[in-house]
Image (cartoon, coloured by chain):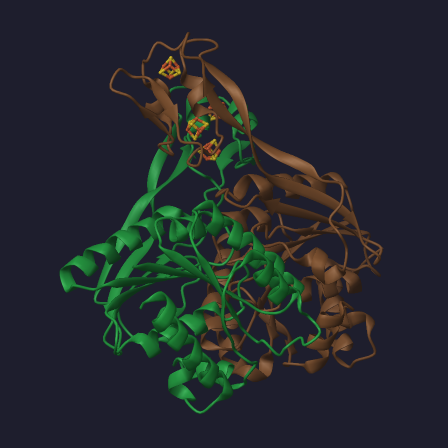
Chain colours: A brown, B green
Amino acid sequence: MQIAVSGGKGGTGKSTIAINLAIALREHYDLVLADLDVEAPNDHLLLGVELANEEPVELFMPRFDYQKCTRCRKCAEVCEEHAIITMRDGTPFLMPNLCSGCAACEIVCPVPGAILPGKKLMGHTYLTETPYGFPLVTGRLLEGEERAMPIVSRAKKRAQGLEKELLMVDTAAGTSNTVSKALEDSRLIIAVTEPTPLGIHDGELILRLAKLMEVPAMVVVNRSDLGDVAKVREIAEKYGAEVIAEIPYSENIIRSYVEGKPIVLTDYPEAGLFREIASRVVEFLGGGE
Amino acid sequence: MQLVIASGKGGVGKSTVTASLLYLLKDEYRFVAVDADADAPNLDLLLGVERWEEERELVGAKVARINTESCIRCGICQERCPYDCIKVIDGDYVVSELTCEGCNVCGLVCPVPGTISLDEVRSGVVRKTTTRYGFPLISAQLDVGRPNSGKLVTEEKEWAKKLMGELGLKHMVVDSAAGIGCQVIASIGGADLTILVAEPTPASLSDVQRAYKVVQHFRQPAYLIINKADFNPGFTALREWAEAEGIPILGEIPYDRAIPRSMSMLKPFVEAFPDSKAADAMREIAERIREEILK
Ligand code: SF4
Ligand code: SF4
Ligand code: SF4
Ligand code: SF4
C-alpha cells in the first residue's frame, strides 16, 4: 500500500509534513519513507541522518565500434532525443548529455557489435535507517545530469522491494511526469499547499494531476494564516478533495526544524496537528494492524 | 548579457527576489525577463500579469499508444520499456500516458507492426506579455504529467533572444526552475553568470551546492544572495561555503513579513513595502549588481 505527499509549489513545507507524518504513522504501520524529490532530496537532513547504503543508478549509453559500423545512420534516425549526430559520411557521434539511455539505437542497429553497451552514472539511491523506527529510501540525481526519471523509478523500486505495509513517497514539486511516476500506485495523495495566490495556483495543478491519475486527494494547508484558506477550500471542493488540516505559520515549527527535532515528537501544540493528520490518513486507509 | 537566478531548492524566495530585482532595475536597463520554471511558473503572478499578448502551443512531447485490437499480449514492450510505463489493465497492455518518456523502445521491440504508435502530444504553452512595468516577460506552462522538458525552456530563451533583437534589449534575466534537472540546465547553459539564492538551512545549503555544481559545469561565475538571513542565526555553514568557494555574496535579506504579504498583493516587495527592512537590503543588492555585474 502506498500513499504520497506532494505539493505544487516548492518550499511549502512538503518535506516537513512528510517526515512528521511518517513518524506519526509509524505507530500504525510498518512503513518506509521514500524521498523521490531526486533533484533536491532533503528528508534525510530533516531526519538528521547521513545517507547510507549507496547504490549507483547507471544507464545504458551507446559506444560505437567504428570498425564494425557501416554508417547506415539508423541509430541516429531512431533516437528521439537527437542525441546521435552523424558526419557527412554517416559516422555516428553521441552527445552524451542528450542521451536518455533508452537503448533504441542498439535495438535498431543492424550490425551486431557496432553499438556496445556503455554505461553512464546518473545518480544514486540510498537506504538509510532512521532513529524513528522506519527506513528512508532516497533518490539523488547527479549534478549535471538532466534526467530525473530513471532515479525516481529506481528509488521507488528499491523502496517497494522492502515490502513494508506502507510505502510513503515524498515527491518533487510540480506536476511533471516524474511526479506522476512517484505518485503512481498511490491510494491517497496528501497535497500540501499554502493559501497564497501562488500556492493556490500550484495546488490546483497537483489536484488536477491527482484527478487525472484517479487517486483521491486530501489537502493540508500550511502557513494557513498567510492568506485565504476559503479559496483553498473552494479549489479543493472543485476537485472533490477535502481540506483535512490547517497548520498556521509557527515559530515552533521553525525552531524544531532548525534544531533538527521533528515537531511531532515535541510537546508543542503543533504536534497534535500532525497526529490529527495521521489519524485521518489511518481512518481513510481503513486502520492499522 | 544573460543572467540566471537559481537556487536548487524551491521556496527559498528566488522568484520574489527576482521580481523585486527586476522592479529595481527596470528604469535603468532594457531587459527581457524569462520565467524558466515551466512546471510551476509564478513570476507572472508576482508581477501582476493579467493577460498574455501571445501564446504558442508547444507540441513535441511524444507518448506511445498501444492498439489493443492487434496486440497479441506478448508482454515484450512491458519488459523492455526503460521507465516501467506499461501496465496490464484488465488483460490489456496500456501505456501510462502520464509517465511515458516517448522513447519509442516499445514500438521498436513490438513484434506486431503498427500496434504501437508514437503520437505527438501538446507539452505546454510558451507565452509573452508586456508587464505593467514596461519590460516584456516570457513564461511557459508545462501541461500536467508531461516530461519536464528543458525544450520548453530552450524555446522560451529563443523567443526572448528574438525579442531582444526586435526591441533592442541588452539583457535577459532568467528565473530558473528549482532543482538541478533539465530545465535548470537549459536555463544555465548559454548564460553569462548565475546568481544563486539560498537561505541558511542545511536543506537549502545542500541544494544550492548542487546548483553551483551545474554552474561550474558550464564554467560560469556565480554570486550568492542569502535570503531569510537572520532566520537561523547559529547556522554559518552557508556563508563559510560561499567564502571557501570564492563566491561573492551580493547581500543578505532579513526575514520580513513584508515579503509574504507582498506576495498576497501580487506585487514585488520593494514596490509594496518600500520602507521594509527587506526592501532596504534588496536596494543594496541591486546597487551591487549595477556596479559589479551590469556595469
Ligand atoms: S540510448 Fe536512446 S537516447 Fe541514447 S543515443 Fe541511443 S536512442 Fe538516443
Ligand atoms: S545503426 Fe549501427 S551500423 Fe548504422 S550507423 Fe548506427 S552504429 Fe553504425
Ligand atoms: S515510448 Fe518509451 S517510455 Fe513510453 S512506453 Fe514506450 S518504451 Fe516506455
Ligand atoms: S509488444 Fe506489441 S504485441 Fe506485445 S504486448 Fe506489447 S504491444 Fe502487444
Residue at the spot 46% in from the left edge and 9% down from the top edge: A112
Indicate whether A172 appears above or below B149.
Answer: below
Residue at the spot 77% in from the left edge and 48% down from the top edge: A128
Seen in the image, is A208 located left or right of residue B229?
A: left
Which is more toward the observer, A218 or A203? A203
Indicate whether B104 appears above or below B278.
Answer: above
Which is more toward the observer, A123 or B108? A123
Residue A74 percent coordinates (x, y): 34, 18
Seen in the image, is A22 located left or right of residue B199?
A: right
Seen in the image, is B4 located left or right of residue B10?
A: left
Does residue A174 appear anywhere in the picture? yes
Residue A269 percent coordinates (x, y): 77, 81
Q: Quadrant of residue A150?
A: top right
Q: Quadrant of residue A262?
A: bottom right
Residue B294 percent coordinates (x, y): 32, 67
Q: Quadrant of the N terminus of chain B?
A: bottom left
Residue at the limit of the structure toward the bottom, as seen here: B275
Seen in the image, is B222 located left or right of residue A169?
A: left
